[in-house]
Amino acid sequence: MKEVQIKNSVKLRRTELGNLTQGDLAKQIGVTRQTMNLIEAQKYNPTIKVCLLIADALDTSIEKLFWMEDEE
């Protein structure tokens, strides 16, 4: 299987919306602030369910928040 990295722009989108904190977003979707921190730092790949909840909470599409990059 081809090696890929999952990238995201969750932090960028969250900050674009104003003063929505990691904790606020985490509470809204039902995860911990620590989990949200790991997602934003790209150290944890969330489930598709969490990805969809984040996209909905940030009023955007999942494709704009998460994408794959080939590893060289």
Image (cartoon, helix red, strand yellow):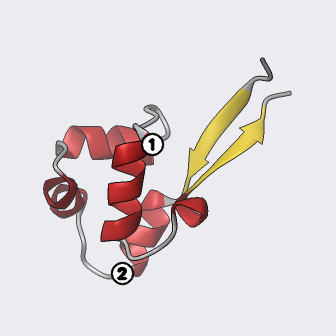
Q: Which residue is drawn at the image coordinates 17% and 56% (left, top)?
A: 23
Q: In front here: 53 or 11?
A: 53
Measuring from the top left, give residue 55's x and y in whole percent. 41, 64
Q: Which residue is drawn at the image coordinates 48% and 67% (left, top)?
A: 12
From this view, report whether residue 33 is shown above or below residue 19: above
From this view, report whether residue 60 is shown above or below residue 36: below
Q: Which residue is drawn at the image coordinates 36% and 46% (left, top)?
A: 49
| Disc with the residue nearer the chain's start (2 vs 1) | 2
Query: Considering the image in quadrants, where does the C terminus appear?
Result: top right
Measuring from the top left, give residue 70's x and y in whole percent. 80, 35
The amino acid pointed to by label 2 is Leu
CB under 8 Å between discs 2 and 1: no
The numbered disc on residue 58 is: none
SS for dot 1: loop
Measuring from the top left, give residue 64's x and y in whole percent. 59, 66
Query: Considering the image in quadrants, where does the N terminus appear?
Result: top right
Q: In front here: 63 or 36?
A: 63
Measuring from the top left, give residue 32's x and y in whole percent. 17, 42
Q: Determine whether, in the image, residue 16 is placed left or right of residue 67.
A: left
Task: Count residues near mark 1 (Cα–Cα under 10 Å), then give few for <14, some for 14-19, many for 20+.
Answer: some
From this view, report whether residue 29 is shown above or below residue 37: below
Q: Which residue is at the far top?
A: 1
Q: Determine whether, in the image, residue 20 is placed left or right of residue 67.
A: left
Quickly name the residue at label 1: 41
- How many callouts does the rendering have? 2
Q: CA distance from mark 2 to mark 1?
A: 19 Å
SS for dot 2: loop
The numbered disc on residue 17 is: 2
Q: Which residue is drawn at the image coordinates 41% and 50% (left, top)?
A: 51
What is the quadrant of residue 19 in the picture? bottom left
The amino acid pointed to by label 1 is Ala
